[in-house]
Image (cartoon, grey):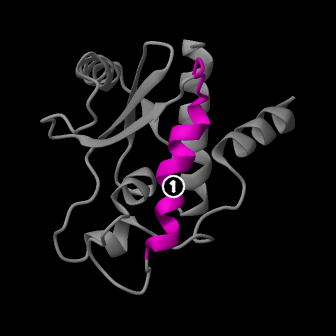
Amino acid sequence: FRGLLFKKEFLHTHNAYRAQHGAPPLTFNTELDDAAQKWANQMLAKKKLGHSDTDDGENVFYAWSSETKTLTGKEAVDSWYSEIKDYDFKKSGHQPKTGHFTQVVWKSSTELGVGIATDGNTVFVVGQYRPAGNITNAGYYQKNVLPKGTGNTHTHFDVLLLLLIVQR
């Protein structure tokens, strides 16, 4: 895996989706990176998908192929975000089969860590988020999982690029 490229794609894809939902961009946190990597390594060693015992938010992803499997940083995030199809913005609170999506766009989360582990055919990806999303207290989902179109349709990266061009 192209580690740095994978991480950049992983972060950019998160922030592109978050921008569409009025959530601020995430930044990488090395402590979360280390914890996510450790957990990805443990899942690969056991060949078993599951969540760690972290207090931080966490999304996990698994892929297998009989051929050598390569994965971009975008693919895992796209998979998690695809759960938007099952999310009803008119309802408040936790909804089944949408926890990965809601964590990706959770407005209060500001930091991200990523871990990826592979043996060539099996790939495990872990995203860890701080502060954690998917808090079930009253009103938290309404404040943190905003409908698509709530935010700027440009990605945060596009806005930064535009600012750099304008400043020249």
Residue at the far bottom in the pictured view = 90
Residue 37, percent from left and from top: 33, 19
Whether residue 108 appears in magenta in the rendering, the answer is no
Q: Quadrant of residue 31?
A: top left
Report the residue at 60% width, 22% height from top: 70
Query: Height in image: 81 above or below 48?
Result: below
Viewer-closest of 85 and 23: 85
Secondary structure predominantly adopted by residues drawn in magenta: helix
Report the residue at 37% width, 53% height from top: 103
Where, quadrant-wise, is the N terminus in this rendering?
top right
Report the residue at 27% width, 75% height from top: 93
Give the secondary structure at mark 1.
helix
Q: Quadrant of residue 159?
A: top right
Residue 144, percent from left and from top: 37, 65
User: From this viewpoint, is residue 24 visible?
Assistant: no
Residue 158, percent from left and from top: 74, 43
The reply, left or right, for residue 145 in relation to residue 136 is right
The reply, left or right, for residue 67 in relation to residue 62 is right
User: From this viewpoint, is residue 115 visible?
Assistant: yes
Viewer-closest of 168 and 31: 31
Viewer-closest of 58 and 140: 58
Q: Which residue does the numbered mark 1 point to in the structure image? A: 81
Q: Amino acid at mark 1?
A: Tyr
Segment colored magenta? 67-87
